[in-house]
Amino acid sequence: MEKTEIAANRTMDAVESMLPIADNLQECLTQVRPQWNNLMGGRIDITSFKDLCHQIDGLLTQVEGDTTSLHGQLTEILMAQDFQDLTGQVIRRVIELVQEVEKQLVDILTAFGLDEDYKEQESDNQTGIEAEGPVVTEEKRQEKQVMQSQDDVDDLLSSLGF
């Protein structure tokens, strides 16, 4: 989460620093466009043509500098995304851990004689019926204590160290 937050801040900072550059380029192009249109339409005198040439020269110099800045900021955004690989590795490890815990819980349930109920639940799932949990009745259990609520299940898991 920390890596994600840092990357988001780096990305937003880079984008914010690029916005004035893009606005400035847009403004300069807007200033040059009317004279350029006059040149392309053949409606420009020699003095205006010289002014246009100086404006375009200044614009080209500005664009060279601004594109260097934009390139640097885009590289910063790209580098800020390096957390994705690390995050993926962490998520993969968490999934493996959850699968291992699930396997150990099944082993515990099997050790306590709930194997038949687990197999019934699995067969129900294979037929398309998804139960919320194992249905345990007094008739199927050797002990007389039956889980009546989620609190009973939580207490059992708590007593087992989970």
Image (cartoon, rainbow, N blue to C red):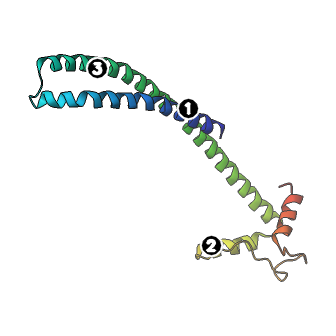
Nearest the camera: 24 or 77? 24
121 to the left or right of 35: right
Horizontal and vertical percent position of residue 124: 64, 76
Image x and y of residue 133, in percent: 73, 71
Q: Which mark is residue 60?
A: 3
Q: Nearer the viewer, residue 152 or 45?
A: 45
Mark 3, secondary structure of its residue: helix
> Looking at the image, do the residues carrying marks 3 and 2 touch, with CB atoms under 8 Å apart?
no
Q: Earlier in the sequence, mark 3 or mark 1?
A: 1
Task: State the mark number for residue 10.
Answer: 1
**Quarter occupied by residue 31:** top left
Q: Which residue is mark 2?
A: 125
- Please count the marks in the image: 3
Q: Amino acid at mark 3?
A: Leu
Q: Looking at the image, is mark 1 or mark 2 earlier in the sequence?
A: 1
- Judged by depth in the image, the label closer to the viewer, 3 or 2, is 3
Cα–Cα gap, marks 1 and 2: 46 Å
Residue 118 vertical placement versus 101 (above, below): below
Residue 25 % position (x, y): 35, 28
Secondary structure under badge 2? helix
Type of amino acid under label 2: Asn
Farthest left residue?
Answer: 42
Q: Is residue 145 above or below residue 30?
A: below
Measured as percent of width and height from the top left, residue 61 is found at 31, 17
Residue type at numbered disc 1: Arg
**Residue 48 in the figure: left or right of residue 72:** left
Callout 1: few (<14), some (14-19), or many (20+) C-alpha neighbours within 10 Å? some
Q: Residues within 10 Å of mark 2 (few under 14, many from 20)?
A: few
